[in-house]
Image: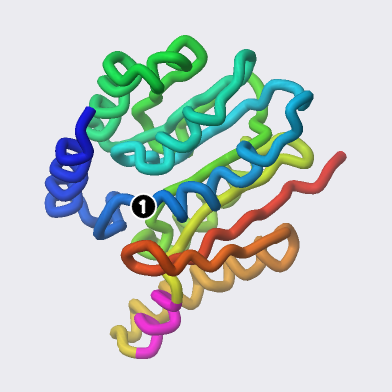
């Protein structure tokens, strides 16, 4: 599957559905490495992991995930955009690297709020464009992130650096209020659960990756 096709699909959907696509370009490999830190760095003798990717888009981060999946792992992808979902399914069918883990992977086309699983996940990786959403929806999404996390599980998500602070300074009042509310939600979760923040400068635009760990017990 050529990168040209991936970028063409991405930019077409970005143009047509900016609110839910959010990014202006697929994530860089540096951002993907950071997002998959928990999966990549597990010990050789670690038990199988359950991995959930939310908003994978055309699979820029998914490529790195599938490289590090092992026998016994479970991988679920939740994608709202039907075009992206079909693109991902095609890659699991036709790309040799992806096809290796196709039997243990499944693409689900639905909002995160409607996704159900029979067990929680050790790793949740999210590419959702949270800064584009209503504040109440962001709060709801974080509740579902943690609902799907197993005890000691890690959530990794990214956001573009300083976007909220810049848009809060120059946006209309309603936009400022929305972004401040989102900032309050993210700040509350980061204060309680964050274990690491990575600065990713080789990305368009530069981004932060936030890593949050759910308490055990």
What is the crowding at mark 1: few (fewer than 14 residues within 10 Å), some, or many (at least 20)? many
Q: Position of residue 212 (x, y in %)?
A: 67, 54
Query: Could you tell me which residue is drawn at 27 percent across and 16 percent down?
Result: 94
**Would you identify the image quadrant in which residue 129 lies?**
bottom left
- Asked if residue 81 is positioned above or below residue 195 in the image, the reply reads above
Asked if residue 117 can be seen in this view, the reply is no
- 136, 49: nearer the viewer: 49
Q: Is residue 59 magenta?
A: no
- Asked if residue 45 is positioned above or below residue 28 in the image, the reply reads above
Q: Is residue 68 left or right of residue 56?
A: right
- 64, 59: nearer the viewer: 64
Question: Which of the colour schemes (rainbow, by chain, secondary structure, one colour) is used?
Answer: rainbow
Q: Is residue 163 magenta?
A: yes
As drawn, which residue projects farthest toward the top? Answer: 103
Q: Position of residue 108 (x, y in %)?
A: 39, 25
Q: Is residue 185 left or right of residue 55?
A: right
Query: Could you tell me which residue is drawn at 36 percent across and 35 percent down?
Result: 79
Q: Position of residue 157 (x, y in %)?
A: 52, 53
As drawn, which residue projects farthest toward the right? Answer: 217
- Asked if residue 85 is positioned above or below residue 6 in the image, the reply reads above
- Asked if residue 110 is positioned above or below residue 26 in the image, the reply reads above
Reading the image, the residue beneath label 1 is 27
Looking at the rendered image, the quarter that the C terminus falls into is top right
Query: Could you tell me which residue is drawn at 75 percent across and 22 percent down?
Result: 47
As drawn, which residue projects farthest toward the bottom? Answer: 169
Asked if residue 2 can be seen in this view, the reply is yes
Magenta range: 162-169
Chief secondary structure of the magenta portion: helix
- 92, 170: nearer the viewer: 92
**Would you identify the image quadrant in which residue 119 lies?**
top right
Q: Is residue 125 left or right of residue 49?
A: left
């Amino acid at each position: 599957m050529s990168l040209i096709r991936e970028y063409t699909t991405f930019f077409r959907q970005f143009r047509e559905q900016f609110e839910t696509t959010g990014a202006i370009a697929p994530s860089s490999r540096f951002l993907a490495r950071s997002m998959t830190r928990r999966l990549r760095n597990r010990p050789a003798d670690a038990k199988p992991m359950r991995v959930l990717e939310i908003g994978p888009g055309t699979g820029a981060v998914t490529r790195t995930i599938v490289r590090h999946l092992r026998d016994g792992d479970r991988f679920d992808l939740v994608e709202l955009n039907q075009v992206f979902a079909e693109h991902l399914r095609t890659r699991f069918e036709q790309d040799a690297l992806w096809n290796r883990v196709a039997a243990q992977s499944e693409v689900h086309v639905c909002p995160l709020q409607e996704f159900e699983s029979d067990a929680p996940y050790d790793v949740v990786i999210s590419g959702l464009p949270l800064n584009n959403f209503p504040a109440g929806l962001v709060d709801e999404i974080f509740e579902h992130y943690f609902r799907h996390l197993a005890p000691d599980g890690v959530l990794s998500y990214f956001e573009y650096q300083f976007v909220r602070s810049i848009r809060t300074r120059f946006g209309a009042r309603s936009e400022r209020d929305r972004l401040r509310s989102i900032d309050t939600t993210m700040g509350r979760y980061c204060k309680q659960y964050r274990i690491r923040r990575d600065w990713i400068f080789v990305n368009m635009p530069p981004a932060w990756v936030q890593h949050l760990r759910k308490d055990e017990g």
